Image (cartoon, grey):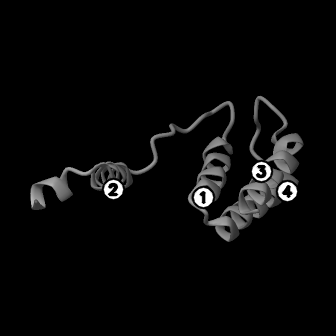
Amino acid sequence: MAAHVFNSPCNEATRRQHVIMQRGPQLKESKRRPLANQIAKALCLSADERFDEALTELDQIQAILSSEDAPGSSRDESKDMPLYRTAVLLFQG
């Protein structure tokens, strides 16, 4: 019976999630979009139901974009910030 519990789909999913968490972020740094990792982090925090942290991350990104020394990017990330914030708030409910 113990083997059945260990091999249940829930335990397998938990094991896979643990392995992924040990590996760390899989998104590579982008020279064309230097804020891509932070944006992905914010959206992933939201998917993990860590909404306050996601919104804080988006606030930090917005502050970076508003500063005079914002990193150069192949696209204007500031145009998408309202969409990201809306997505987090939508997930939050």
Residue contact at pointers 4 and 2, CB within 8 angstroms: no
- Mark in the foreground, 1 or 2: 2
| Chain-order first, disc 1 or disc 2 | 2
Which one is in front, 76 or 13? Answer: 13
| Chain-order first, disc 3 or disc 4 | 4
Which one is in front, 49 or 6? Answer: 6
Task: Identify the residue under disc 2.
Answer: 14
Image coordinates for residue 47, horizontal then vertical, percent: 60, 54
Rounded to the nearest angstrom, the CA distance separating label 1 from label 2 is 18 Å
Quadrant into which the N terminus falls: bottom left
Using the image, tell me which numbered label, if any, was put on residue 87: 3
Near mark 1 (Cα within 10 A), the count class, few <14, some 14-19 or many ≥20, is some
Image coordinates for residue 89, horizontal then vertical, percent: 79, 59
Which one is in front, 90 or 59? Answer: 90
Rounded to the nearest angstrom, the CA distance separating label 1 from label 4 is 24 Å
Disc 4 marks which amino acid? Ser
Residue contact at pointers 3 and 2, CB within 8 angstroms: no
Task: Reply above or below: 58 against 29.
Answer: below
Residue contact at pointers 3 and 4, CB within 8 angstroms: no
- Mark in the foreground, 4 or 2: 2
Q: Is residue 49 left or right of residue 17?
A: right
Task: Identify the residue under disc 4.
Answer: 67
- Mark in the foreground, 3 or 2: 2
Task: Identify the residue under disc 1.
Answer: 45
